[in-house]
Amino acid sequence: MRRIDAGTLLRSLELQYIGPGHFEAAAALCRGNPLYYEHYGAPPPGPAEILQDLEALPPGKGYEDKYYLGGFDGGQLRLLLDLIDGYPDGDTAWIGFFMLDARLQGRGFGTRLVSELLGALEACSFRRAALGVVAGNPQAEAFWRKNGFEFYGEPRSGRQPVIRTMQRMLGADTNMMEE
């Protein structure tokens, strides 16, 4: 499996691996996005749940495939990104979590970060980026559609909340419109 150089994924923020010293800041960033958790049907995570998220792996993947990253600006956590190398297949990068500081939303910054991320993934020879969104979360669906993602497959309805999968093929034009 290819190894992603986490330091090259974004230009607009400094990426660092999230560790125990970041758990409270990560939980605070999540608390600042209450609308997401309303749709998710659970309260925002605390530090213990951040650790669980950090340790969670999809079937057949190991920790060498997981990139649980924080995007920092001036020492402040602005983005949480969970990325899986080669899931569900070797040509796909799975975006397990992408949460931007609510104070930076609605200004085109999230779109710029997605554009940077997709460009870096394409440079790593990924052919597709995929993710799941909570069904019925119109803000998340609109954000990812605006960034070129399309729904595919059947919703994962055997769990709550229901998750709809989205994908974007890489290798074509990854320059997206600004918000």
Image (cartoon, rainbow, N blue to C red):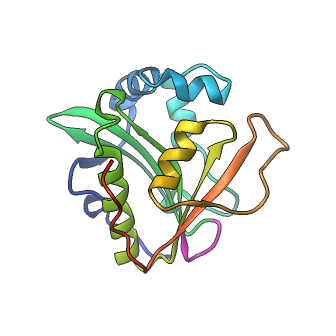
- Vertical side of 77 occupied by 47: above or below: above
Q: For this rendering, which residue is in front, 128 or 176?
A: 176
- Does the magenta portion include 84? no
Residue 163 in view of the camera: yes
Q: Main secondary structure of the magenta part?
A: loop
Residue lying at 35% horizontally and 25% vertically, measured from the top left: 25
Q: For this rendering, which residue is in front, 33 or 29?
A: 33
Would you identify the image quadrant in which residue 28 lies? top left
Image coordinates of residue 142 in percent, x first then y, are: 52, 45
Bounds of the magenta span?
Answer: 88-92
- Tally the marks: 0
Judge from the rendering whether residue 171 lies leftward or rightward of residue 96; answer left or right: left
Residue farthest to the left, as pictured: 74
- Does the magenta portion include 89? yes
- Vertical side of 54 occupied by 125: above or below: below
Residue lying at 69% horizontally and 50% vertically, measured from the top left: 164
- Vertical side of 110 occupied by 23: above or below: above
Image coordinates of residue 162 in percent, x first then y, are: 75, 40
Q: For this rendering, which residue is in front, 13 or 61?
A: 13
Would you identify the image quadrant in which residue 60 lies? bottom right
Image coordinates of residue 89 in percent, x first then y, are: 63, 73
Q: For this rendering, which residue is in front, 38 or 52?
A: 38
Judge from the rendering whether residue 47 lies leftward or rightward of residue 28; answer left or right: right
Image coordinates of residue 159 in percent, x first then y, are: 81, 39
Residue farthest to the right, as pictured: 158
Residue 45 in view of the camera: no
